[in-house]
Amino acid sequence: MKEEENKVTLHGMWANPYVKRVELALKVKGIPYEYVEEYLMNKSELLLTYNPIHKNVPILESPLFPQDQYQRAKVRFWASYIHQVLLMYSTLLLSSQIHIKQTNPYIIFLGYMCMQVYDCMLKVFRGKEALKRFYAKLSVLEDGINNFSLGITSNMNNIGMLDIMIVITLGAYKVQEEVFGFKLLEEENTPLLYSWVTTLIDLPIVKGITPPHDKVVSFLQYLKNKVFKAPPHAS
């Protein structure tokens, strides 16, 4: 009975980066869990019960934070940067390549790989300007890695909060490049960040929660062809 009460159940959607963060954190912590796939156009009663306000996913010893309080504060700062700035500008970059066909909030949410929709994401930045803005934000993080001495994780037992944040945010860069045709991450521009991400995506624990390549390609192709339309050519 007690074992049943302590059981962890994760309600999620396979393409949602926030769900993937939780899933990877549970694996890092070695916490057994049951995964329930949610269809966000037809949400389950349990999802609505557990999260009645936002009605969204996700609904949860290898420490994710350093023991030193100063280092913990640094991790929180950069985790916030990745979440609030890097994620936002990566979606702005996507919005510069495409025009939204539909304005339904769920379609926008789905179209951005289920990322949180910020108001400024709806402002369309074009071509080189979008890349310039995004790469500038990556450069800030690159400098942070160098100054903070974050180190490159090569052991799944040492994965921390920043590792989870960065690999879920940028780990699909190859697939996005394949489908949308722009480079999200380049070794020559941000070598430390590139090394960090590529090392993480090769870890067995990360591979274990990564959707199959063909499935992600099909999903993004569907969004590109059905949900979005190509931007008009400049005259």
Image (cartoon, grey):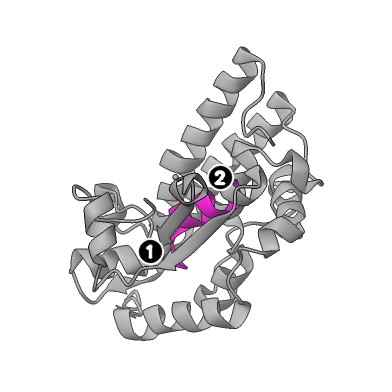
The residue segment tinted magenta is 13-25
Frontmost residue, 68 versus 103: 68
Q: Position of residue 77 (x, y in %)?
A: 51, 26
How dense is the environment of label 2, judged by Cα within 10 Å: few (below 14), some, or many (20 and up)?
Answer: many
Q: What SS does tag 2 mark?
A: helix
Q: In which quarter of the view is residue 227 placed? A: bottom left
Seen in the picture, residue 130 relative to 35 is either above or below; the reply is: above
Frontmost residue, 231 versus 162: 162
Q: Which residue, given by chain and number where applicable, does mark 1 sit on?
A: 112
Q: Position of residue 58 (x, y in %)?
A: 39, 53
Seen in the picture, residue 114 relative to 142 is either above or below; the reply is: below
How dense is the environment of label 1, judged by Cα within 10 Å: few (below 14), some, or many (20 and up)?
Answer: many
Q: Position of residue 225 (x, y in %)?
A: 37, 85
Q: Amino acid at mark 1?
A: Tyr
Frontmost residue, 212 versus 170: 212
16 in magenta:
yes
